[in-house]
Amino acid sequence: MEKGNFQVEMYYTCPPKDLGSVVELSFGDSKIKAKIIEAFDSPLVGKEHDRVLRMESYVKEFKPLNLGIITLPKGKGTLTLKALEMPNKAVADFRLLQFKKVD
């Protein structure tokens, strides 16, 4: 990985009943966190095109959540995304993290 500061977005879905969770992204000593305060619960799509019902492979839209700017060193390591607070029984559905270099 290249050294630098990166703007990070987490793509998620979250029903209104699960709002309020706080997630943290960390790499070594660098950490950023954000609270999920906006519900976004898109429906699964694709079933209407199937001839045979199935349980997997349907898709839905995900919403970006700005986690903030994280400073990353050059090199390899473990990137960790975890929930720090979970007011209900679930946090959110997570799809991907998007990094954009800002310096």
Image: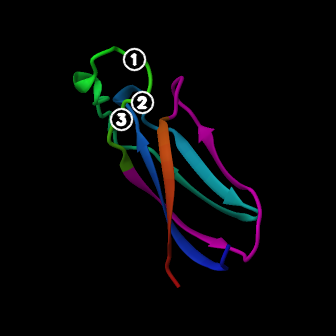
| Residue 73 shown in magenta | yes
- Residue 57's tag is 2
Q: Position of residue 34 (x, y in %)?
A: 51, 52
Q: Tell me the crowding category of disc 1: few under 14, some 14 to 19, or many 20 or more residues within 10 angstroms, Cα based.
A: few
Establish if 22 lies above or below 70.
Answer: above
Gap in angstroms between the C-alphas marked 1 and 3 = 13 Å
Q: Are marks 2 and 3 in contact (CB under 8 Å)?
A: yes
Question: Which image quarter is the N terminus in?
Answer: bottom right
Pointer 3: residues within 10 angstroms few (<14), some, or many (20+)?
few
User: Height in image: 82 above or below 70?
Assistant: above
Side of 21 relative to 73 (left or right): left
Mark 2 → mark 3, Cα distance in angstroms: 6 Å
Residue drawn at the location 35% of the way across and 30% of the way down: 16
Label 1 close to label 2 by CB (< 8 Å): yes
The residue that disc 1 covers is 54
Amino acid type of the residue that numbered disc 2 sits on in the rendered structure: Ser
Name the foreground residue: 61 vs 16.
61
What kind of residue is marked 3? Val
The image position of residue 43, as x and y in percent, is: 29, 29
The residue wearing badge 3 is 59
The residue at the point 38 percent across, 53 percent down is 64
The residue carrying pointer 2 sits among few (fewer than 14), some (14 to 19) or many (20 or more) residues within 10 Å by Cα, namely few
Q: Which image quadrant for residue 2?
A: bottom right
User: Reading the chain from its start, which is encountered first: label 1 or label 3?
Assistant: 1
Q: Amino acid at mark 1?
A: Arg
Badge 3 element: loop
Determine whether, in the image, residue 28 is placed left or right of residue 70. right
